[in-house]
Amino acid sequence: MKVAIITGGAKGIGKAIAQKLASLSINIALWDVIDEGEESAKEIATTHNVTSTFYKVDVSKYNNVMDTVKKLLDDFKKIDIIINNAGITRDGLLLRMKPEEWQSVLDVNLTGCFNCTKAVLKSMTSQRWGRIVNISSVVGITGNFGQSNYAASKAGIIGFTKCIAKEVAKRNVTANVIAPGFIETDMTSSLPDEIKEAYQKQIPIQRMGKPTDIANAVSFLISEDASYITGQVINVDGGLVM
């Protein structure tokens, strides 16, 4: 059975991805900083009859990531797939943005993607098979008012992934990006109704996406059906960006 790491996997999009991959008989290594990951991992294991283990890890800390990968390799013996999904927001106008609000978003969203990808790459290239899917955002393509830190981090993920895709393609490792649009998560549910309605009017499909929409795209990109696809950005956004 293949083994997949999902960062930020305790809830929301990450948990939906973990559930989808588990339904395909893939063993799951669930990474997160919140303790809810323990229950999510148990739920996934029970529902899908796979091994699902929770690792509490801060992806922004290089040594924490490297140590966790060593432990994971002891537990699972291999790593086939990584989904870099962990991310945070610290929104605000640039004129008012504190340096630590800028840096914390870059540390988790972009440096975290670097740390995790670097940590698993040797294992993937040695076995000559791997799938890397990095979760960016349409905001990394279009920009967004009050999100200069978030947009920069998500645009950085796109450039980073294209470079990695070129470096590892000859080893049968693919690297792609999914850029979600407006998805129903805890992050978006806290927005005022009028803001959500305004966003929804901009979406041609006229509804917000669901975490399962992202999970379904991930399941395709990690499959053999997508073995000739690498270095690409797939917008899953109901037509918001065309």
Image: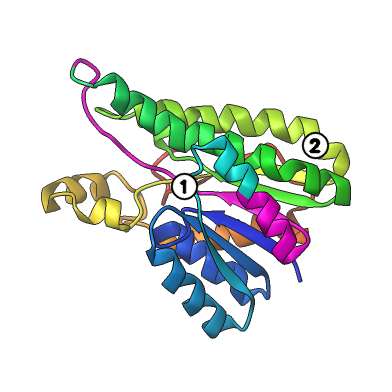
* Residue 169 x %, y %: 81, 38
- The residue shown at (66%, 73%) is 24
| For residue 76, above or below residue 108 | below
* Residue 25 x %, y %: 68, 75
Q: Which residues are magenta?
A: 68-95
Cα separation, mark 1 vs mark 2, equals 22 Å
Residue 168 is marked as 2
Camera-nearest residue between 222 and 41: 41
Relative placement, left or right, of 159 versus 25 is left
- The residue shown at (60%, 76%) is 23
Relative placement, left or right, of 100 versus 132 is left
Task: Report which quarter residue 225 is drawn in.
Answer: bottom right
* Residue 194 x %, y %: 12, 49
| For residue 148, above or below residue 69 | above
Q: What residue sits right under mark 1 in the picture?
A: 86
**Disc 2, SS:** helix
Q: Residues within 10 Å of mark 1 (few under 14, many from 20)?
A: many
Q: Quadrant of the N terminus?
A: bottom right
* Residue 75 x %, y %: 70, 65
Camera-nearest residue between 39 and 172: 39
Residue 167 is marked as none
